Image: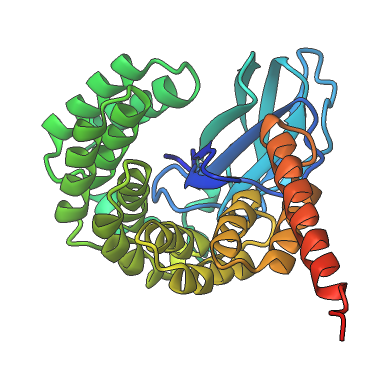
Amino acid sequence: MHNRHSVYVFALLFLAGLPCAAQVDPRNHVIMGIVRDEASHEPLAGVRIELVSGGDQLVAPPTDTSTEGQFQLGCKKGDFYILAKKSGYVPLQVKVSLGPSQETDVAIDLKRQAAEESSGAGPGEAVSAHQLSVPSKAREAYEKAMELMNSKKDYPGALAQFQSAIAEYPSYYEAYAEIGIVHNFLGEAQAAEEALRKSVALSSGKYSYAILNLAELLNNTGRFADAEPLALQASAFEDSGWRGYYELARAQFGLKRAADAEESAAKARDLKPDYPLVYLMLTNIHLSLRNYASVLQDIDAYLGLVPNSPTSDQVRKTRQQVERALEKTRAQNAVVPRS
């Protein structure tokens, strides 16, 4: 979760789902992240993202976050710093260490500068009335938990701090959602589901972040019938953007409704054309529909975004198989029957 997905092989290629991507030239590793307003937890668009070494040397072309607050950077393994900058917010530096894993997820919360708090906020950047009602002790525990989770990867420590925040403020549905994320990182799916459902209930079904992550969790565990209504609900939220349709496509495909899944995945693709995994979703859908011409288009779009990764190698093998199947079909159709 946190836009973290997983790709599995099924027949030629089966997408089980996984958090986020944007246009970059990924090399050996990929850093995928999201930037949010620290107070409202809404995604921030147009945040300048720089990846630097210890000597402030740029190691990848800078990029800006998308309308969903997402970014992606390609780089080689090692220790680096991510610099996040946006007018009206305090710049933040986050250390990332890239090891054997091909993908690293990062969540960044930017704090609004004091001088800017009374100025007009853009769409998705306003502090909600609920956030303003959070007691200071609960907020402090929450912020410490987010740092432990995102920067230090100390999930048990983060869990303890989130629980402290809830003890101070029992209706803190944002904290319950993050507890769900922590349990997911710890491989505790049942506890993650319970926390996310609590967040949804406390928010009266209005916190799309919790709904989306719950739908993703259910899809990841193969509970497609349970995931579908949540994904459908999330897709109705303006701030959920493409993710609602993406999770809806996953659920519908898992329920063997390929035509419905194709329609939902196409909506997700149109809203987020630089998200590589939506093209893998479409690849699987079009394979099941035996629409091989579209499969080739899906694969080419995916490889244009992610040319170098273990998954890309599998995708290329799938493309070769599809091309051979098409050539065989053309050859058979070209045979003129004897009179």
**Which residue is rendered at x = 31% and y = 68% of the image?**
233
Q: Is residue 269 visible?
A: yes
Q: Quadrant of residue 146?
A: top left
Considering depth in this image, is 94 or 287 the residue closer to the camera? 287
The image shows residue 78 at horizontal and vertical percentages of 72, 13
Answer above or below: position of 40 versus 236: above
In the rendered view of the protein, which quadrant contains the N terminus? top left
Q: Position of residue 95 (x, y in %)?
A: 61, 19
> In front: 211, or 52?
211
Q: Which residue lies most toward the bottom here? A: 339
Classify residue 247 as left or right of residue 133: right
Residue projecting furthest to the front: 339
Q: How is the image coloured?
A: rainbow
Residue 4 to residue 250: above or below: above
Give how far across and how far down residue 289 sits, in percent: 56, 68
**Left or right, 115 with reference to 75:** left
Q: In the drawing, does residue 80 fall left or right of residue 225?
A: right
| Placement of 55 over or under 285, stated as above or below | above
